[in-house]
Amino acid sequence: MAHRPLKELMALASPPRAGDFLAGVAARGGGERALAQMELADVPLARFLEEPLIPYERDEVTRLIIDSHDRAAFAEISGMTVGGYRDYILSEAADAAFFARTAAGVTPEMAAACSKLMRAADLAAASAKVSVVTTFRDTLGLPGRFSSRIQPNHPTDDPRGIAAAAVDGLLYGSGDAVIGVNPVSASLPDLSRILHLLSELIERHSIPTQSCVLTHVTDTLELIRRGAPVDLCFQSVAGSEKANRGFGLDLALLAEAREATLSLGRAALGGGNVMYFETGQGSALSSDAAFGVDQQTMEARAYAVCRAFSPFIVNTVLGFMGPEYLANGKEIVRAGLEDHFCGKILGLPMGADVCYTCHISADQDDMDVLLCMLAAGGVTYVMGLPGADDVMLNYQSTSYHDVCWVRRMFGRRPAPEFESWLESFGIVPPDRALLPGAGGDRPAGLLLAGL
């Protein structure tokens, strides 16, 4: 019997989600999906190298995946089927060293295929085995650590509002991944003012963290040329050349941006991790650039773009794009666990924006479930917002309080350098329970002084 094309088989085997129904590639029911998953389980991993889902000659992301594939790293798993690979990584034989050895040999399509055969607990259990460590001014991704991004957005980019939200987060022990602002303005002087504000806060108090203004990579390049204090270079990316063109970029531009950011020499710990990428299921479909590939596999292909530039952090933004792509809390939870799993086994420092917009059938209970599952799976970091409510982007995410209770519940700690700074600043009491205001008024006053 002739094999079905991989692109069709992958789509039919995907758990249900709105974007695949919108694209007309989803299975018509549970029976068809189960049969596709059974067939997918028997597909040799090597077939993914022979049958690109988007033609090599048409797409630079496909060329990146094929040309950068590490055959030596693949050798250990080259004789496995998708189902055999799934079984192996869930066995006791697969440890952190195995994932480190094989990461460069796994393609995004292999990772996505494997995830389609796994339930939520499997995705968390496998992800928890993987440790991906990156450095800038502190060290992320170490076992037993759980980091956070302070997201001090403001509806008018008011420096006082940004500073207050950032200090609030620091007092809760958040911010070891990055203090990152989504600006309202695209004005270069405005963007520069925010960067200088964050840089002054970090440098004045010797905080072992990094800042970022989440603007387009071309803006960041110009800010670097103008002498702005850029720590991390941000960009949203997708899983096809056409989709990335919709973002106004290509791989050459990302390479230029990375080199420019590295040239500033601001990473105290070295390591070359200066890029911050965000992704999200549905981005390729929204720009008519998915080529009939299911949205979760397209998301995994975006991780090939991320991996090529040795990022400090990668963030999958889950429920932000709307119900056309992820319709409800169940789909968001599933997507978050898939993205986290695929990114980690590809060797990426994966974080997640555990979020939803108000026109999706989801609520904070769904986010709590996903947050717990991601924490169990060893997620590198999540967002920290005042009250979990982004007052500029108008969506719901996770709060500084959530970061605290995850650390308490799971026995996780901040990045080691950041933890030492918290203690030295009087923010963390001796029992290491992250209590807001533990050091009295002194920390807040010092942090706000002069800002």
Image (cartoon, rainbow, N blue to C red):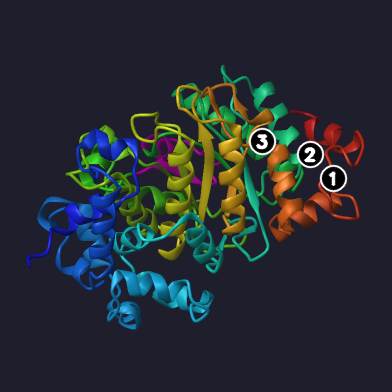
Side of 316 relative to 128 (left or right): left
- Looking at the image, tell me whether mark 3 or mark 1 is earlier in sequence order: 3
* Residue plotted at (33% across, 38% down): 282
Q: Is residue 49 above or below residue 415?
A: below
Label 2 vs label 3, nearer the camera: 3
Contact (Cβ within 8 Å) of mark 1 with mark 2: yes
At a point 44% along the width and 73% down the height, the residue shown is: 89
- To which residue does mark 2 refer? 171
- Other residues around mark 1 within 10 Å, as few (<14) / some (14–19) / many (≥20): many
Residue 183: image location, x then y, percent: 51, 27
Front-most of residues 256 and 298:
298
Q: Residue type at mark 3: give it.
A: Ser
The residue to which callout 1 is attached is 427
x and y percent of residue 228 in the render? 53, 37
Report whether 125 appears left or right of 179: left
Q: Earlier in the sequence, mark 2 or mark 3?
A: 2
Q: Is residue 262 visible?
A: yes
